[in-house]
Image: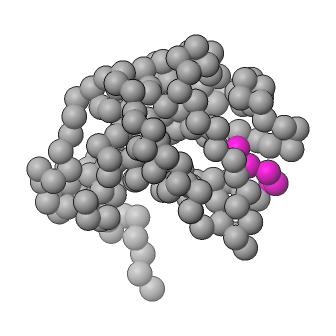
Amino acid sequence: MDAYLAIVSRREVRDYDRRPLPDEVIDRILQAGRLAGSSQNSQPWRFIAVTSRSLLDRLAETVYVPGNLRAAALAVVIATRGGRSAFDAGRAAQNMMIAAWNEGVGSCPNGMPDPQSAEALVGLTEDENARIILTFGYPARPREPESRTAEEWVARANRKPFDEVVTRL
């Protein structure tokens, strides 16, 4: 898939069909995160891939919308070391979500009101912080990115107008 089409057609998926993801798809998603850029190539992250149904259910209690984890085939906890690594974690997350979309897999970032509980569940060390939990799975309602042009996806997006968010100097 064209990278721009992948970016403009991707939407958050919160309703998954519960099919398991093949290991090679999971590996491609994780590899995309691993290869994300980071400040001074510090790679301050660790990715905890969760496919265990019982752990997904327990981890669901640590996020704002538990249903996202309960229905997902995979959750990835992005953990970082150091205080200035949130941007790098975001870069890794976006890489993973775009790589997943290329495989026909939907995704959604999940915030945590109680990150310490999530950290304990997945065995993070004292110097690691859970930054975000991403969910992945095949969408319950499949979407076909190539069914529209990139321009059509842009026109359908529920976003502020271009000129409202872009200033050229």
Q: Is residue 13 above or below residue 144?
A: above
Q: Residue furthest right?
A: 126
| Percent x, y of residue 49 | 58, 36
Residue at 80% across, 43% down:
128
Q: Magenta stretch: residue 122 in it?
A: no
Q: Is residue 163 left or right of residue 109?
A: left
| Percent x, y of residue 102 | 32, 52
Q: Residue 15: in sight, yes or no?
A: no
Q: Residue 30: in sight, yes or no?
A: yes
Q: Residue furthest bottom?
A: 169
User: In terms of depth relative to the viewer, which is nearer, 19 or 80?
Assistant: 19
What is the quadrant of the C terminus in the image?
bottom left
User: In terms of depth relative to the viewer, which is nearer, 61 or 156?
Assistant: 61
Q: Which color scheme is applied?
A: one colour
Q: Is residue 33 above or below residue 3?
A: above
| Percent x, y of residue 21 | 40, 33
| Percent x, y of residue 44 | 73, 57
Q: Is residue 142 left or right of residue 86?
A: left
Q: Is residue 73 left or right of residue 91?
A: left
Residue at 40% across, 53% down:
98
Residue at 50% across, 24% down:
69
Magenta stretch, main secondary structure class: strand
User: In terms of depth relative to the viewer, which is nearer, 26 or 143?
Assistant: 26
Q: Give the extent of the magenta segment.
A: 79-83
What is the quadrant of the N terminus in the image?
bottom left
Residue at 64% across, 38% down:
48
| Residue 13, picture quadrant | top left
Q: How many marks?
A: 0
Q: Magenta stretch: residue 81 in it?
A: yes
